[in-house]
Every structure is written in C-alpha cells, then in structure tokens.
Image (tube, grey):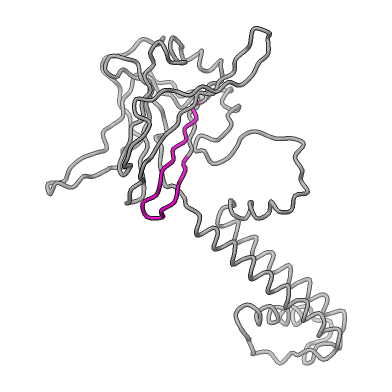
Amino acid sequence: MSDRKKSPASSGGFISPRGSRRLAIIKGQDSSRWTDFYHVGLTAPWWLFFLCLALLYLAINALFALLFMADPQGLANARPDNFWDAFVFSVQTIGVQTIGSIGHSPMVARSIYVDVVVVIEAFIGILYLGTVTAMLFSRFSRPYARVVFSRVALITPFDGVPTLMFRAANQRANQVVDAGVNVTLARQMTTREGIVMRRFEELTLMRSRTSLFALSWTIMHKIDEASPLHGLSLEDIRAAQMEIVVLLSGRDDTLADTIYARHAYQPEHIVWNHRFVDVLSMTPAGVRVVDLNKFHDTEPVPELMEKVL
C-alpha cells in the first residue's frame, strides 16, 4: 500500500531529495573567508552567475564614472557633470582591455587626474577579464553527471524476500565505466545512556558495481534478518527520521573524468507493494530503447505484502 503523506521528520535530512544542497543550518562559520566567492561562483546557477557578472561590470563602470566626474574638465568633448558620458567613457576604457578599441567616441582624457584613473581602471579591467575567463573555463570544464534517479523507492517482494529498490539511468547517450553505488541509511537512535545521535549504516546491495552503466540500473537491497530495515513498519521509519542517501560514481567515457551523483529518499518517498514499469524495449531493427517518460512510473503488485516487514 503506498503512502506519500509528507512527514514532519523529513526536514532533518542532510541533503535534498535530488542531492543538490545541504539542509542543515551551520552556525558559527567564519564568514570572512573571501576565497569562498570562487566556490560560490562555480556552484551558482548559470542565470545567477551571469547576473552577478553583469551587476559587477555595471558597478565597476559606475564607480569609475563617478571618479571621472570628480574632474569636470578632465574629459574632452564630454558634457559637464553628465553621468552617462562618464559611464560610456568608463565602458570604453574597460573595452580597450577586453575586446579591443571601440573607437567611436570623441571623448578623451585631458588631465593628469583622468589619465591616472584610466590607468587604474585598465588594470582592474585586466583582472576582471582574467577572473571571468578562469571561472567560465572552470564551469565549462567541470564534469557533471546527468544521472536521473527514480522519484520514489519501492519496498516490494523480490524472489520472495521484501526488497528495497530504486533505479537510476544515464541521461547522456554515452557510457559510465566502472560505476559504483553506495547506499547509506541515516536514522536517529538513542543510546543506553539516553544520548540521541544520528547513526549511519551502509546497506548491502545485491549488485553495488557495474562495469558499464549506459541504460537503466535497478539498485536493490534485500530486507532480510541482517538488514537494518528488517521488522520495521512505515511508522517506525518515520519515527526514526530515516533517510536513504545514495551516492553513485563512475568514470565518464567521454570526459575521461570521474563523475558523481547524489540522491536521498525520505519516508514520504517510499512506496510499498508497487513495482516499476518496464522502460526497456526493442525496436523491430533490434535496437534497445530506454523510455525515460515511464522512468518514475510504478504499478501495484497483485500479491500484497504485509505492512510490517
């Protein structure tokens, strides 16, 4: 019987169900480490990355425009106290260092003060260009895994034994060589001394490695007497704030680099007595087809299990 009711305990997870971020709030961190801006620049979404670049570019030019305006007679052919003229001249100064001379404006420096500001801005323009180039290269060259995990994990009979199973698929049309998966069960436990702590136990899988991960992979854990899940009901899983954390790694055959994919299943993501709809088929020409449109679909098992394992 499936149960997708949201559990209040799910907020205690360490990563989001899609494995994209941590859900813990860490207090007391050192917020003065300016070197972390590089890490933030690599992990930020593309839209936010380019938005920040644009805002920084505008801010630099606006700052130097104000510096140019400090000398009203320093710019030839510019309107006195006109911010836009000073801003355009600033953009042209950085443009000379980045994309070459623009050369369509009659404005030129005619004071030592403006010449000094131009030199400083040109130097900052070189640093800006170098930093942006390095970050763009790092973002494009980072190996990203395009592995999709099923939205739910199932507990259903397999060869007569209750089995926890979920599946993964490689969304790229290539191969992941020597892929391995590690599944960890995180849960709240109380020691005999009354100390409540988070415990992590690795789940033994029926197949934890595959030499070639190219299509779909169903990952299974038998819930036998040796399993930490043995004898637990869905209420027990919720009460212990259980979370199934998945880490899949392998070597991308195209990038020749190691890729990682993470995912997490919480109590509301576990469906009982269902099985996955088959996504593999063959064309009349004998070509295998993986239908990811059905990847997350499940269907009831005719022979229902007992609720208690």
> What's drawn in magenta, residue-wise?
244-261
Q: Is residue 198 magenta?
A: no
Relative horizontal placement of residue 8, taking residue 251 as reference (left or right)? right
Dividing the picture into quadrants, the one containing residue 165 is top left
Relative horizontal placement of residue 216, taking residue 281 as reference (left or right): right
Which x, y percent locates residue 126? 68, 74
Q: Percent position (x, y) of residue 175?
A: 33, 48
State the residue at coordinates (78%, 71%).
Answer: 63
Q: Is residue 275 left or right of residue 60?
A: left
Q: Give the quadrant of residue 304.
A: top left
When the figure is inspected, residue 215 is found, relative to residue 106, above or below; the finding is: above
Q: Nearer the viewer, residue 226 or 235?
A: 226
Query: Where's the N terminus, which quadrant?
Result: top left
Q: Is residue 169 above or below residue 187?
A: below
* Screen quadrant of the C terminus: top left
Q: Is residue 253 magenta?
A: yes
Q: In the rendered view, tell whether residue 240 sits above or below residue 136.
A: above
Which residue shows up at 60% across the image and 37% down it? 22
The residue most toward the top is 192
Residue appearing at x 76%, y 90% in the figure: 108
Dominant SS type (magenta): strand
